[in-house]
Amino acid sequence: MLIVDDEESITRTMQMMFEERGFTVQTACSCAEALRALGNGHKYDAVITDLNMEAEDIGLEVARAAKRATPAPVVVVCTGYANVNNARVALDMHVDYLATKPVDLDQLFSAVDRLLARRRDDPASMMRASKSALPRREI
């Protein structure tokens, strides 16, 4: 799992919480760092990214890069600044889950678990997701 947020305290807290649940977690504190991680060939089951980091809506670049990966990971966008425009873009790129801040961690854990279970039950969905053919899901 890759967790991306420009606030290091958030990435570290989420990392600890997901690791306690058995996930292997890598963190990135910027879009550029996340794009490098996604481009290094490592396969992530899930990518959780903040929407607004060093620039407004920059987390959508992370989501786009994650959706292009093969197999495509579950993609979660977290934001305290959702609006009609960025929500529409997230929907159009088939982001799997849009969480508003402050994020309810129990809901986030449940959503990630449910989405990963769907992917395990239907491995072909990961290939479809990387080609943007995945139907809209958990938004």
Image (cartoon, rainbow, N blue to C red):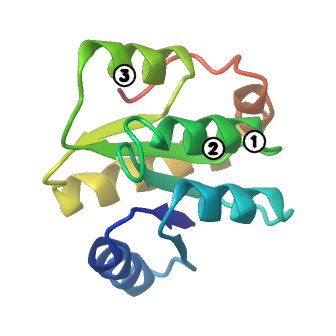
Nearest the camera: 70 or 8?
8
Q: In which quarter of the image is the C terminus?
A: top left
Residues marked 1 and 2 touching at CB (< 8 Å): yes
Dot 1 alpha-carbon crowd within 10 angstroms: few under 14, some 14 to 19, many 20 or more: few
Q: Which amino acid does label 1 sit on?
A: Pro
Nearest the camera: 52 or 78?
52
Tell me the tag on residue 112: none
Mark 2, residue position: 119
Mark 1, residue position: 123
Residue at image coords 86%, 62%: 41
Residue at image coords 43%, 56%: 113
Tell me the tag on residue 86: 3
Residue at image coords 70%, 20%: 132
Q: What residue type is labelled 2?
A: Arg
- As drawn, 88 above or below 118: above
Dot 2 alpha-carbon crowd within 10 angstroms: few under 14, some 14 to 19, many 20 or more: some
Residue at image coords 38%, 30%: 138
Nearest the camera: 12 or 114?
12
Q: In this view, does 52 lie to the left or right of 94?
A: left
Give the secondary structure at mark 3: helix
